[in-house]
Image (cartoon, coloured by chain):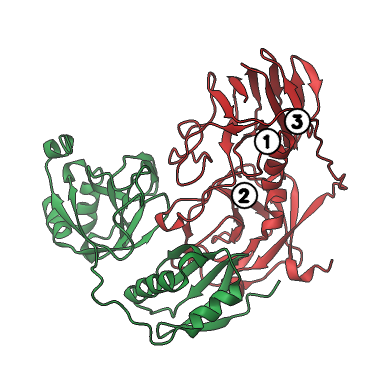
Amino acid sequence: MGKLKVIKAAGLSTIQDEGRFGYRQYGIPQSGAMDLVAMHEANELVGNAPNFPVIETAIQGLVLEAMQDSIIGLTGAEVSLTVNGNKAPMNKSIQLKKGDTLTVSSPLAGVYSYLGIGGNLVATEDFGSKSTYLLAGFGGVSGQRLGKGDVLETKNAASFQERIIKKMTQPQSEIQTIRIMKGPEWSLLKDLPDRMVFQIDPSSNKMGIRLQGDPIGVDGKEIVSSAVIPGTIQVPSNGLPIVLMNDCQTTGGYPRMGKVIDADLGLLAQISAGRQIRFALADDIKT
Amino acid sequence: MKDTEQQSLQFNSVSWGLFRLGEKTLLLEGPRNIPIEKVHESASLISKVLGKKLQDIVPSYTSIALFHTSNEDELLTILASKKNLKVDKSAVVERVQIPICYEMGLDLKEVADQAGISSDEVIKIHLAGRYKAILIGFTPGFIYMDGLDERLTCPRKSNPRKLLEPGSIGIGGEQTGIYSLASPGGWNIIGRTPLQIFDAKKQPPMNIKVGSEISYERITKQEFESWGS
């Protein structure tokens, strides 16, 4: 088992798993990790099942103290990681000794980092998931973001094994291609720019990623409220698309031009404000 | 991946346009003028027919979103094969009476001014109304209802409130609804109910569902405060 105490959690750090499913009919959003691949990797590093809850941290990092020997692993957005002030590796399992201090910096590249702790994290379960949904106070530590003094305890940890996630070194292109599929209101689009290139707006969060760029024209401003899901690309009347993300509402009234394919959602979540993306129809891309 | 090229599905005597909302989410879009009752009836028939193949279902004004975990073609084949489905006419429509305290209506006066009538008249008209839950969304348990008397329509507030108390009952344009949980909101609040509409610890978390008929019963502020004690 593992036990860590939060010494400092200045930004947005929450407990997340894969999210809640089957409750959209009650208006309950999916929530869950923004970058599922990185979340699964964090669990893999510490010998957990892939769907175990992990700590998702963004913006300003986290300081934790081990109250017992604990196995941890950090994945996702690149951060500077230290144990007792000494640099420690990301994407590699780490055995913390009781009393060790773990410091996770603000992201250096990317947005969301994932801290896996060996064992099954004790947290509030609401609607089949321990994912924190701040707006309604579901999951996590009493539905709240992590704060000073919170204790993260796990049950039934596997024994320590050295594990490494091999990261494919991808060439960082200036403009990241994000694959999309057409949505129900695709046919309402007009004046579709030749290059659907947009910039990530700083106001983006777990509810949605706002985009800046050449507006997309739409026939008819609003539709009657209808279902939306993480990945849905809404086009409000100003023509600037919003990609709905994990904490999005279950229904919306803006035309749905399409959806970012599941395989690219985590990639999109990790693109920091100010950087550019390009939408490309998934079926136009030949692999 | 296939295009969302419009195909259609005949189900429950309705021709539904077929779209893909996501990899595992189908959207059945009914005709523009489809009665809401037909949407609700079709949604409950689909739930019955597909059973566990369906993970979730979100009916809204003219469409039904199907969240599944299996093969899309298989689902469509099953739905298309169901002819002459018997609608259970004896199914009881949930009728719910909700206590409302108008003294806690933060915007009762604005609604009255907008209508050019007194607050008392607003209350009288509102109490006489019969409402129907047509959509649950926005935030967990938020209930959109129809049935608002057109005299009570009132544009959304230009400056939404950052925090509304749970149980706030509001009017936004021609729509009316209940904020089941504390949340930000831009609708005009005409009253508040002490009922806990949404309870995360209960399964299901709410008794009111899409299609439920709702009426209001006036309570005093004193009754509000001592409710349930």
Judging depth in this view, the residue of A208 and A76 nearest the camera is: A76
> Chain A's colour?
red
Residue assigned mark 2: A209
Mark 1 vs mark 3: in front: 1
Residue drawn at 66 percent across, 44 percent down: A50
Q: Chain of mark 3?
A: A
Judging depth in this view, the residue of B178 and A89 nearest the camera is: A89
| Earlier residue among tags 2 and 1 | 1
> Would you say residue A272 is visible in this rendering?
no
**B196 versus B128 height, above or below:** above
Q: Position of residue A165 (x, y in %)?
A: 80, 39
Chain letter tied to green: B
Q: Position of residue B41 (x, y in %)?
A: 35, 74
Q: Amino acid at mark 2?
A: Ile
Q: Chain of mark 2?
A: A
Q: Chain of mark 1?
A: A
**Quadrant in which the C terminus of chain B is drawn:** top left
